[in-house]
Image (spheres, rainbow, N blue to C red):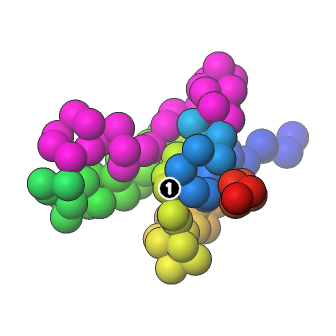
Amino acid sequence: MMKIKPKLIIMAGNIGTGKSTLTKKYVEQGYVVASKDMLRYTIGNGKYEDIIWGTDLSMVYNFMKLKVNIVVDGCAITKDIRESYIRYGQLFNYEIIAVELPKLSK
């Protein structure tokens, strides 16, 4: 019997492109959300960025140990930033999907 890989969805896009709206749809399907924005609102906006980044990656790592589906909701996620999530996904044998939302029209 073939085992289904857990999924890691990495959302990328500017503010207002619909990342969080789409993320809510994944939550309805049982995905766990990792979001630096949520951590900022909880911990302190811009005050503890190093801790926020470390906490976000730690959350993803620990949820991957549980083999749950994860969606990373983040603004301005560059290729370099995505690489950390991708490395974890590869380590834990996740199906990795990057969703890049289009830029807003001017």
Span of residues in magenta: 21-45
Task: Residue at the far bottom: name it.
Answer: 80
Task: Residue at the far top: name it.
Answer: 28
Is any atom of residue 8 visible in this view? no
Give percent across and percent down for residue 43. Answer: 17, 40
Tell whether 58 sits left or right of 95.
Answer: left
At x 61%, y 57%, the residue is: 13
Along the viewing direction, whichever of 28 and 65 lies nearer the viewer: 28
Give percent across and percent down for residue 6. Answer: 67, 44
Tell whether 104 sits left or right of 45.
Answer: right
Q: Is residue 32 magenta?
A: yes
Quadrant assignment for the C terminus: bottom right
Give percent across and percent down for residue 2. Answer: 85, 45
Tell whether 56 sits left or right of 99.
Answer: left
> How many numbered circles does the render carry?
1
From the image, tell me which residue sits under label 1: 75
Mark 1 residue type: Cys
At x 57%, y 37%, the residue is: 20
At x 42%, y 44%, the residue is: 35
Give percent across and percent down for residue 30. Answer: 61, 24
Q: Could you tell me what secondary structure mostly forms the magenta stretch?
A: helix
Relative to 14, is 86 above or below? below
At x 49%, y 37%, the residue is: 33
Quadrant assignment for the N terminus: top right
Is any atom of residue 18 visible in this view? yes
